[in-house]
Amino acid sequence: MSKIPGDLRYTESHEWVKKDGEFFTLGITDYAQNALGDIVFIELPEVGTKLEKGKPCGVVESIKSVSDIYAPISGEVTDVNSELVNMPELCNSDPYGAWFVKVKVTTQDDYNALIPADQYEKHCEHAE
Amino acid sequence: MEQTKRTQLYEEHLHLKAQMAPFAGYEMPIQYSSVKEEVLSVRHGVGVFDVSHMGEFFIEGPEAQEFADYLIPNDLLSLDIHKAVYSPLCRENGTVVDDLIMYKLATNKVLVCMNASNVEKDWNHMRQYQKQFNVKFTNRTESYSLLAVQGPQAVPLLENLGIIKNSDNMAYYSAIETTFGRDELIIARTGYTGEDGVEIFCSHQFVGKLWKMLLEHKAVPCGLASRDVLRMEACYPLYGHEIHDNVTPLDSGLKWTVKLQKNRFVGKEALAQYKPKWQLLKLSIDKMIPRQDYPIENSKGEVIGHVTSGTMSPILNRGIAMAHVAQDQYVKDQQIFINIRNRKCEAQLHKGPFVVGGHK
């Protein structure tokens, strides 16, 4: 059973988004890290990159596979977790602490449209 | 759609919470704990793989050796009894049908073990030549379970358990028919990891008992994902990657398996004249991870080939790849780049395998 914090919002492609004041951070869920296995490489967008909701914005590689990360919300990248790029295994050990990027948005509509924890839990159960 | 088959150990895999996925028509364990941990357990201790999906054919009769030897470019005839040989299986035109291991169990009995995905294809190919020989040829894939027990501690463990009675009689690439209690086993000192170890062909009734004995003695269950990493580190080719229906063994670093001095074998005439189109390179890069089909480029940015297999090596902590480069576009030791998502990563060329295991 994977961990699903109640205060985050989720996508069906297993990204999480956290509201942090006027900014948003995002990462991949416990379910995602577990399915991927040992994560050994992460590629993140640079500061200033304009994310477009639903478009690939990064890459996560485990030993066995490559996965695109899809932007859960549109907005501008204001900060990148460089510690994570150097230690991609943090994604496995602490998926909700291992944020990828911080994003500034113009509207909260994208965030409001994301799935709440209880619905995401059902989505994961269905996927299993 | 044909229904996905299960090995005898299916319930054991579920019980261990393995990630399962369909592979060659079987529902197979991909990983149990972590690919990295599984790889390291095979390099440093002992791991056990359920590879019961693989195919087993038996060639028996007065001309068993002649038939077996005729099918493959490598040399089975001059092997001693109880020895094994790795070989590609080729068509008349030299292209690769599959690769396999042949075990000379007796003067009149040869076991052939092949990739699960190619069982039917190999069977149909081989059957074409059967009538020229006085042999009984049977497909017993459904009758055998197969465990690969691999790693430096594999043989000591099996000796402790009394399954291998005397490892002195079991040189690398040898095979014996033996018993454990009332159960009949074929134990072969072969594998696909680069480490010492054995492959044990046994009945479906016995395999559960064997699996449990091994796990109780700290053998680590390993899935197909770690098996793939281990074989890439050892630079073993895989059908569908380094070898396939459109290349010959001479395109893929397997010249050593093509014994043109043999009187005859299927594909000999074609291979004797064949000018290789490809050269197989072993490459590693820092940080990034090469994957199958990524382009190989020269310093001018021209595409001269493609990655055939790639992964991250937990031992080297580098991205590793085998790659086909066009023979007419590659100059020995030239600078090589792997194009990864439009980034050019300079690759280091390796002469030998990335990891030299302890098989003997």
Image (cartoon, rainbow, N blue to C red):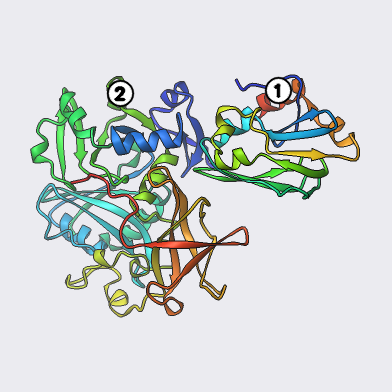
Amino acid under label 2? Lys
Q: Position of B240 compared to A39: left or right?
A: left
- The residue carrying pointer 2 sits among few (fewer than 14), some (14 to 19) or many (20 or more) residues within 10 Å by Cα, namely some
Image quarter of residue B265: bottom left
Instruction: Tell me where residue A8 appears, x and y as whole percent.
Output: 75, 25
Q: Is residue B73 visible?
A: no
Q: Position of B48 compared to B109: left or right?
A: right
Which residue is more in the foreground, B5 or A102? A102
The label on residue A121 is 1
Amino acid under label 1? Glu
The label on residue B218 is 2
The label on residue B206 is none
Q: For numbered disc 2, what is the local secondary structure?
A: loop
Which residue is more in the foreground, B2 or B310? B310
Instruction: Tell me where residue A124 appears, x and y as whole percent.
Output: 67, 27
Q: Position of A21 compared to B9: left or right?
A: right
Image quarter of residue B77: bottom left
Instruction: Tell me where residue B128 appears, x and y as whole percent.
Output: 32, 62
Q: Looking at the image, is B125 positioned above or below residue B219?
A: below
Residue appearing at x 39%, y 47% in the figure: B316
| Number of numbered callouts drawn | 2
Chain letter of mark 1 equals: A
Q: For numbered disc 1, what is the local secondary structure?
A: helix
* Viewport quadrant of the N terminus of chain B: top right
Q: Looking at the image, is B76 positioned above or below residue A120?
A: below
Instruction: Tell me where residue B132 appears, x and y as whole percent.
Output: 22, 64
Residue appearing at x 20%, y 61% in the figure: B69
Q: Are marks 1 and 2 on the same chain?
A: no
Residue appearing at x 63%, y 41% in the figure: A82
Q: Position of B241 compared to B111: left or right?
A: right
Q: Looking at the image, is A11 positioned above or below residue B242?
A: above
